[in-house]
């Protein structure tokens, strides 16, 4: 189990209220345990026990916000659904790279030896992510591709439509870890549609991942009752996948509006 005090970044009534909600979540998941923090992930991860996490599946800011803002359209309709305008991916490269370094350091402390980590990333930033993770003891395994079969056809008559994101797979302090393939061959190329509206009914997050994509990775790289952590959980997709597959889950999200969406989604999963 990976149970932690709930929401220690908040105090007073708000915290008591959340304690009630998390208790409800614990009951609903039928033995599995979910703990959510509305806090900066580095601060929250300091509260977790060392060597307690089997799997991290996370989707941090890609450091593309400023780049995308310069090249994108000003149409409001697009901006509402566009991470470049969301405000959480606006760092300069050096600041972002330092924040990722801090993240891998904190991740290394909480990982179990032989645990695994998946980091979603823009393809042009993958090399930076591998260097930083290796510095903190992670063993690089694979760069995989997620292909979206129905991407937004933005500027389709001007250039190649962006339809891919990368995911980078590491193990910690060992060269292999849990890999539940049941004898099947799993490719490093995963294809799904973009997140369907049915998965966004509790509120929209501009980079919400499809549940099927995340569940595929959770099931292969961890076992029931393992502890799964997502330090940049956004709308809580990793938590939904973990709960559905009887893993314990720790989720961290800085933004209060996204945190509330995640809380609701995981509770009702
Ligand atoms: C790419 S999104 C994750 C989306 C998520 N995979 C989903 O399916 O909804 C990254 C998230 O990290 C959050 N974030 C950014 N910096 C953070 C930090 N220091 N600590 C915790 N969360 C952070 C952002 O608010 C954003 O929701």
Image: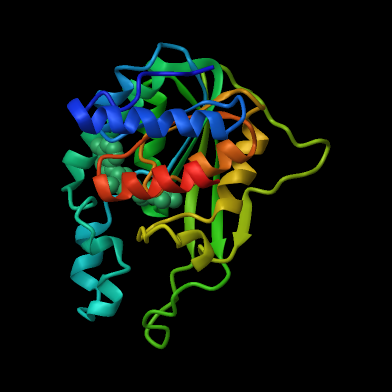
Q: Position of residue 84 (x, y in %)?
A: 25, 62
Q: Residue at x 46, y 18 (%)?
A: 3
Q: Quadrant of ligand 1?
A: top left
Which residue lies most toward the right here?
Answer: 183
Snapshot quadrant of residue 219: top right
For the residue pair 257 and 173, the one nearer the viewer reads as 257
Q: Residue at x 31, y 29 (%)?
A: 103
Q: Is residue 114 above or below residue 30?
A: above
Q: Is residue 115 above or below residue 197?
A: above
For the residue pair 230 and 187, the one nearer the viewer reads as 230
Would you say 30 lies left or right of 236 here? Answer: right
Q: Position of residue 5 (x, y in %)?
A: 35, 19
* Residue 102 visible somewhere in the drawing: no
Would you say 245 lies left or right of 2 here? Answer: right
Snapshot quadrant of residue 94: top left
Which colour style is shown? rainbow
Location of the N terminus (image quadrant): top right
Q: Position of residue 266 (x, y in %)?
A: 48, 43
Would you say 140 lies left or right of 5 here? Answer: right
């Amino acid at each position: 189990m990976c149970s932690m005090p709930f929401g220690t970044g908040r105090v007073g009534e708000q915290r008591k209220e959340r304690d009630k909600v998390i208790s409800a979540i614990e009951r609903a998941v039928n033995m599995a345990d979910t703990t959510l923090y509305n806090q900066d992930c580095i601060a929250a991860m300091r509260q977790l026990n060392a060597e307690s996490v089997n799997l991290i599946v996370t989707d941090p800011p890609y450091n593309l916000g400023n780049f995308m803002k310069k090249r994108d359209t000003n149409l409001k309709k697009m901006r509402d659904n566009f991470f470049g305008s969301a405000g959480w991916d606006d760092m300069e490269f050096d600041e972002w790279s330092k924040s990722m370094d801090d993240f891998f350091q904190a991740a290394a402390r909480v990982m179990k030896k032989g645990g695994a980590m998946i980091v979603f990333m823009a393809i042009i930033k993958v090399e930076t992510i591998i260097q930083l993770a290796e510095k903190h003891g992670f063993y690089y395994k694979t760069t995989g591709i997620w292909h979206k079969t129905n991407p937004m056809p933005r500027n389709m008559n001007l250039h190649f439509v962006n339809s891919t994101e990368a995911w980078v797979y590491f193990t910690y302090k060992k060269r292999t870890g849990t890999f539940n393939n049941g004898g099947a061959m799993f490719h490093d190329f995963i294809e799904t549609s973009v997140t369907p509206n049915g998965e966004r009914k509790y509120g929209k997050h501009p980079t919400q991942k499809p549940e099927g994509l995340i569940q595929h990775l959770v099931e292969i790289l961890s076992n029931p009752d393992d502890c799964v952590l997502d330090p940049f959980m956004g709308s809580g997709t990793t938590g939904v996948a973990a709960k559905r597959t009887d893993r314990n889950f720790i989720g961290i999200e800085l933004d209060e509006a996204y945190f509330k969406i995640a809380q609701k989604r995981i509770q009702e999963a």
